[in-house]
Structures are given as C-alpha cells and as structure tokens.
Amino acid sequence: MSDSPLDFAAFVHVVVGDIPAGRVMTYGDVAAELGSLGARAVGRILATSDGSGPWWRVIGADGRPPAGHADAALEHYESEGTPLRWIGRRGEPDSYRVDLAAARHRFS
DNA sequence: ATTATGACGGTTC
DNA sequence: AGAACCGCCATAA
C-alpha cells in the first residue's frame, strides 16, 4: 500500500482529520502541511477517498466548497456552525462561500 | 517511461 | 467580474 516514507494519501487524511469542527483549510494549505504544492493532488485523494473523513473541512482557496458537493457540505457547515458568507439565494447553486478569514485553520 | 487527468491556485486577458 | 491559460503534483492507464 505504500512505497513512500509517508503515504501522501494517508498524510492527507491525517491532516484533514486534524482540522477542528467549525474550521476549514484550503487544498493548498493541506498540501503545504505535506510540504508540497500539489493542491490538486490533495483534492484528487479526497475525491478517490471513501468520504469517511471530514472532507467538507477542506475547501477551495476562494472559499468554495468541494465542487459538486456544495449541497452536502452546507449541511455540515450549518451543523458545525462554520462561518459562511452568502452571495446568493439559499438553494441556488454556488450561493454561498465559507468565510475563510474567520474559519481558516492554521497549525503551529 | 510517457501521457492524461483532477474535490486546485494564481496570473493574465 | 468572468473566462482562459499555465503551473503544480500525485495517480492511473
């Protein structure tokens, strides 16, 4: 299952699982934690993942939820009280964004 | 080894 | 503001 020191996929899941409820991180941020710039790679891993982890806490750098999953993600955000910023009517596609300025999580 | 792909990111037009 | 373009990186074929 692995031939690297630390599986990229496994590492991604670890970092994602480390994000507190009500907070989020961008794909780029997660990649940065892995010491890489492969934001796309991170997204790819989550996409192929079984969806068991808190995938909704990883969003785009512009505050958009995972492509094609805005609906499912929204339920989690409201459940966790994640700061949202509405840009349109509720129920419409791409009607909200996560308030990155307030919800972005950072490790130290 | 080479090519294509994707829950991305940033710049440029 | 929206669309196009290029760069980055880990997989899959």
Image (spheres, coloured by chain):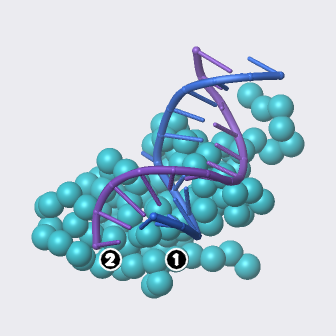
Chain colours: A cyan, B blue, C purple
Instruction: Classify residue B2 by image quadrant.
Output: top right
Q: CA distance from mark 2 to mark 1?
A: 12 Å
> What residue is rendered at 62% in x and 66% in y?
A29
Q: Secondary structure at mark 1?
A: loop
Q: Would residue A57 be seen by someone viewing this image from the given angle?
A: no
Report x, y in % for residue A105. Answer: 57, 76
> What residue is rendered at 30% in x and 79% in y?
A85
- Depth check: C7 or B6 in front? C7
Report x, y in % for residue A88. Answer: 17, 72
Q: Chain of mark 1?
A: A
Q: Quadrant of the C terminus of chain A?
A: bottom right
Residue named by callout 1? A104
On the same chain, marks 2 and 1? The answer is yes
Q: Is residue A98 shown left or right of residue B8?
A: left
Report x, y in % for residue C6. Answer: 61, 51
Residue at the right extreme of this rendering: A5
Residue at the bottom extreme of this rendering: A102
Q: Is residue A27 shown left or right of residue C7?
A: left
Q: Quadrant of the N terminus of chain A?
A: top right
Asked if disc 2 and disc 1 are in contact, CB closer than 8 Å, the reply is no
Which mark identifies residue A84?
A: 2
In this view, A25 is above or below C3: below
